[in-house]
Image (tube, grey):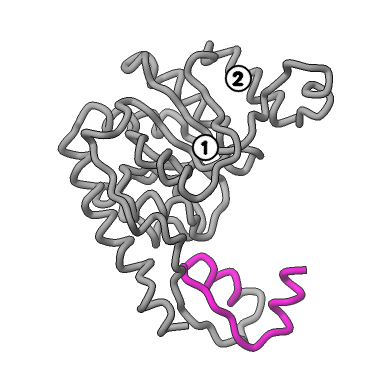
């Protein structure tokens, strides 16, 4: 449906090299218009502080299905815990691994079963927590509590979750997929890694945990970048 719609239009609004390449290959006749996104208001009101975060904690904005990459994060955790045994992961959204009742087991997805298997295999029962559904303010508070935010997807364009983390200044790690490299400069504003290389994800998590100067440096640079990318007035006028 998306391909058919793109073939029939004459104008496309996009914001990354990835979406420009894809749409051009589908419809080279259409005119491409660049325009960044404005994010939810709550994320412009706060700023992350290393003194107020929960040390050695990780936040994921979602992990409900496989392309969001939670299974790779759990593999990385098995490495991180050797250096930082108290590390915790907080995942926004419902607990897809819940199996307390017959109904829970009946509606559990295949991916939920796989995540449950990994948690058991790596003995992560005391390290992985699902927050349940969160509203805008609650999401913002979860970001601010985290020591690191991870966007581990196997496919993305420009994820709002990464934009929100950068806007707050939360030290971030993201997979090198889709339009993400346009959002965050590697080693300057955060860290990028190959999405199916959990050992590299583990390396960057540990790097942020053990090096406060690095965490503060990328936090500052990421926030500066995001305040420009997601500037309300610039984006409204551009649109």
Q: State the SS at label 2.
A: helix
Task: State the residue position of label 1.
Answer: 196
User: Which label was assigned to residue 215?
Assistant: none
In the figure, 39 relative to 129: above or below? below
Q: Which residues are magenta?
A: 1-24
In which image quadrant can residue 39 be found?
bottom left
Where residue 237 sits: x, y (%)?
A: 41, 84
Residue 227 x/y as whole percent? 30, 64
Image quadrant in which the N terminus is located: bottom right
Frontmost of labels 1 and 2 is: 2
Residue 170 sits above or below residue 159 on the image:
above
Read off the residue under disc 2: 118
Image quarter for residue 231? bottom left
Residue closest to the eye, 166 or 232: 232
Front position in the image: 133 or 147: 133
Residue depicted at x 28% and y 51%: 189
How many neighbours does mark 1 have within 10 angstroms: few (below 14), some (14-19), or many (20 or more)?
some
State which tag comes first along the sequence, 1 or 2. 2
Q: Main secondary structure of the magenta part?
A: helix
Name the residue rendered at 70%, 31% in the picture.
111
- Residue 8 located within the stretch drawn in magenta: yes
Callout 1 secondary element:
loop
Circle 2 packing at 10 Å, graded few (<14), some (14-19), many (20+), is some
- Which residue is rendered at x = 54% and y = 14% of the image? 125
């Amino acid at each position: 449906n998306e391909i058919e719609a793109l073939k029939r239009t004459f104008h496309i609004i996009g914001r990354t090299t990835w979406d420009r390449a894809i749409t051009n290959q589908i419809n080279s006749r259409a005119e491409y218009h660049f325009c960044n996104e404005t994010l939810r208001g709550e994320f412009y009101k706060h700023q992350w502080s290393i003194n107020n975060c929960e040390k050695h904690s990780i936040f994921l904005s979602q992990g409900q299905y496989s392309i969001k990459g939670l299974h790779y994060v759990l593999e990385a955790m098995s490495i991180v815990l050797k250096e930082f045994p108290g590390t915790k992961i907080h995942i926004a959204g419902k607990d897809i691994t819940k199996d307390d009742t017959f109904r829970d087991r009946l509606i559990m997805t295949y991916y939920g079963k796989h995540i449950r298997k990994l948690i058991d295999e790596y003995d992560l029962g005391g390290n992985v927590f699902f927050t349940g559904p969160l509203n805008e303010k609650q999401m913002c508070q979860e970001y601010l509590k985290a020591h690191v935010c991870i966007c581990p997807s196997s496919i993305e364009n420009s994820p709002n979750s990464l934009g929100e983390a950068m806007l707050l200044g939360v030290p971030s790690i993201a997979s090198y997929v889709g339009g993400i490299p346009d959002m965050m400069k590697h080693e300057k504003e955060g860290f990028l890694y190959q999405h199916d290389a959990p050992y590299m994800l583990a390396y960057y998590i540990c790097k942020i945990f053990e090096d406060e100067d690095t965490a503060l440096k990328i936090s500052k640079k990421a926030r500066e970048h995001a305040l420009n990318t997601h500037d309300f007035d610039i984006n409204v006028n551009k649109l």
